[in-house]
Image: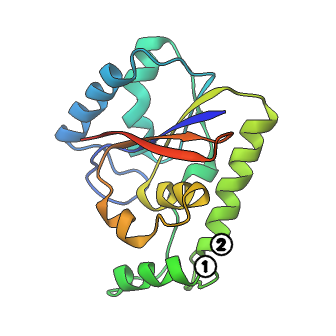
Amino acid sequence: MKIIAVRHCKAEGQESDAPLTIEGEQQARELVEFLKDKQFDRVISSPFKRAIDTIKPFAEKNGLHIKIDERLAERILSAESDPNWRKNLERTYKEEHLKFPGGESTYEAKQRIMSFIKDLQSNSYESVLIVTHGNLLSLLINLFEPAFGFKEWELLSNPDVYLIDVSQNAVSKLWAS
């Protein structure tokens, strides 16, 4: 099974209902062109507006239904405002069970994404397109490339597109804006 994993296009904020920026809308149109020759058994998105809006132009052009899956939602580091969030996020890549108030540990987020992958495998999909968020994407990649951590997360851009070959346990970057 192959997963094409897309980090959403540029958005106006981090809230679940944050829309894409004008640049993000243009990036979504560019994704249509980039993905035009690829076939997918399923298109699945995070429930966040910016993720859905990232793949909506591609789905509409190709007559595809976007399935929403809560397991692709961005990981919440903490429910509290944290001026040291970046440093604390870095800690969670090293301390997988570290959990902040109202947040999700790296371990828990990885369990969530592994559950998602197992469900895809049980459906015998060959090629799936998913749209998610930076932190969750980095943890997904980390499942296949353990060296992919905080520093690599910092280098992600909106949007990035990765190919994850689950059967070959391999990851490759396909596109970055």
Q: x, y percentage for residue 134? A: 41, 57
Quarter of the image with the C terminus in it:
top left
Judged left or right of residue 167, residue 52 is: left
Q: Are marks 2 and 1 in contact (CB under 8 Å)?
A: yes
User: What is the secondary structure assignment of the residue under circle 2?
Assistant: helix
| Residue found at x 25% / y 34% | 27
Up-down: is 103 above or below 168? below
Mark 2 or 1, nearer chain start: 1
The residue wearing badge 1 is 96
Q: x, y percentage for residue 40? A: 57, 22
Whether residue 78 can be seen here: no
The residue wearing badge 2 is 107
- Under mark 2, the amino acid is Tyr
Q: CA distance from mark 2 to mark 1?
A: 5 Å
Up-down: is 51 above or below 139? above
Q: x, y percentage for residue 73? A: 54, 54
